[in-house]
């Protein structure tokens, strides 16, 4: 199973490694337990209550991202949203349920896509959701030009080899006036890439972006920058909650084929990650919002 110690990958290599990280059966099980808490929101979380765990906090992130998106552009049931790196489908399901809109996911893992679509049908949302296999390190389909009212991406862009090229492609796929909302884990501005080793050893990355870089990519690709909400203060607690999920669910995960070595590697990496975040704050995480101008070249403020 996925192990990327001392490795970062080229744009051409990373897709295969992302499949290894997320779409093997055992890794899908791992992420469902350790980040999803049994749910389909496989991403970092926002804490509001002392009793919140990974599932509750991840659900709050989804809700906050939907609020930010809807504030930048009202999302209605006649709209079509592109979910970039849709994974297990938690964001797609939430948007379809909240707004009644159609959601198309693009995701590299066919196994994850099958989980997404099956869950959507179970939730009565099958008529609103589809998921296609695609690689964000390759150009998006030409027929998607000007197709979507909104684009959503949750913790996927760290796997993009050329982030500016991807942003330009997403800009192309949006209708004029469309909104782009995304979250990602980054290196903090000023952080040395070597200090991020506790993350890159367990994740298929090219290089980790920085908040200031993402803001520049937004502007350089033609978008109007709206805001960046900094949730970095939630990361250490989430890392420690992931460790707790491993401890609490180890035997059940082992019964489903996950090895002690894999779990021990993750446990050690997460412990390092939490410690360095506490000591030096080298990781950043949050939500970015941008708009495509209604008129090409004329940005609104």
Image (cartoon, grey):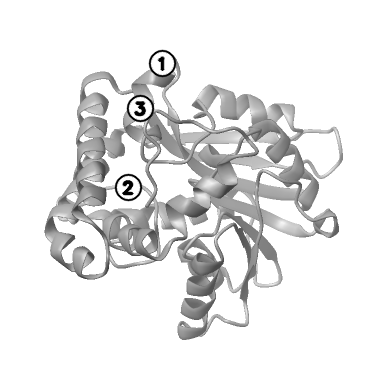
Instruction: Tell me the residue that label 3 is attached to.
Output: 197
Residue nearer the viewer, 89 or 287: 89
In front of the other: label 2 or label 3? Answer: 3
Residue 6: numbered disc = none
Q: Can residue 104 be seen here? A: yes
Instruction: Tell me the residue that label 1 is attached to.
Output: 192
Q: Is residue 160 left or right of residue 166?
A: left
The residue lying at 24 percent from left, 25 percent from top is 276
CA separation in Å, label 1 and label 3: 10 Å
The residue carrying pointer 2 sits among few (fewer than 14), some (14 to 19) or many (20 or more) residues within 10 Å by Cα, namely many
Q: Is residue 254 above or below residue 11?
A: below
Instruction: Tell me the residue that label 2 is attached to.
Output: 46
- x and y, in percent, of residue 212 in the image: 54, 22
In front of the other: label 1 or label 3? Answer: 3
Residue nearer the viewer, 5 or 162: 5
The residue lying at 50 percent from left, 27 percent from top is 211
In front of the other: label 2 or label 1? Answer: 1
Of mark 2 and mark 3, the one earlier in the sequence is 2
- x and y, in percent, of residue 17 in the image: 51, 46
CA separation in Å, label 2 and label 3: 23 Å
Q: Quadrant of residue 86?
A: bottom right
Of mark 1 and mark 3, the one earlier in the sequence is 1
Residue nearer the viewer, 97 or 109: 109
- Quick one: SS at disc 1? loop
- Image label count: 3
CA separation in Å, label 2 and label 1: 25 Å
Q: Quadrant of residue 220?
A: top right
- Quick one: SS at disc 2? loop
Of mark 2 and mark 1, the one earlier in the sequence is 2
- Quick one: SS at disc 3? helix
């Amino acid at each position: 199973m996925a192990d990327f110690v001392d490795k970062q990958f080229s744009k051409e290599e990373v897709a295969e490694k992302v499949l290894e990280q997320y779409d093997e059966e055992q890794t899908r099980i791992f992420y469902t337990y350790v980040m999803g808490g049994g749910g389909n929101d496989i991403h970092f979380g926002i804490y509001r209550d002392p009793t919140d765990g990974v599932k509750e906090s991840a659900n709050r992130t989804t809700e906050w991202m939907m609020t930010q998106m809807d504030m930048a552009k009202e999302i209605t049931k006649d709209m079509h949203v592109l979910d970039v790196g849709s994974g297990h489908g938690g964001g797609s399901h939430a948007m379809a349920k909240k707004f009644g809109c159609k959601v198309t996911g693009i995701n590299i893992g066919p196994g994850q896509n099958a989980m997404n679509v099956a869950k959507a049908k179970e939730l009565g949302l099958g008529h609103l959701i589809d998921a296609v296999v695609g690689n964000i390190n390759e150009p998006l389909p030409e027929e998607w030009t000007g197709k979507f009212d909104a684009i959503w991406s949750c913790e996927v862009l760290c796997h993009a080899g050329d982030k500016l090229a991807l942003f330009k492609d997403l800009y192309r796929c949006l209708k004029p006036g469309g909104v782009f909302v995304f979250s990602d884990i980054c290196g903090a501005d000023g952080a040395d890439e070597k200090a991020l080793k506790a993350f890159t050893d367990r994740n298929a990355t090219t290089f980790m972006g920085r908040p200031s870089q993402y803001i520049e990519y937004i502007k350089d690709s033609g978008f109007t920058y709206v805001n960046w909400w900094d949730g970095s203060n939630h990361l250490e607690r989430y890392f420690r909650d992931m460790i707790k999920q491993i401890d609490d669910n180890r035997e059940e995960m082992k019964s489903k084929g996950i090895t002690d070595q894999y779990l021990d590697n993750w446990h050690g990496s997460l412990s390092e990650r939490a410690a360095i975040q506490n000591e030096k704050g080298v990781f950043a995480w949050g939500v970015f919002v941008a708009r495509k101008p209604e008129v090409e070249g004329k940005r609104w403020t």
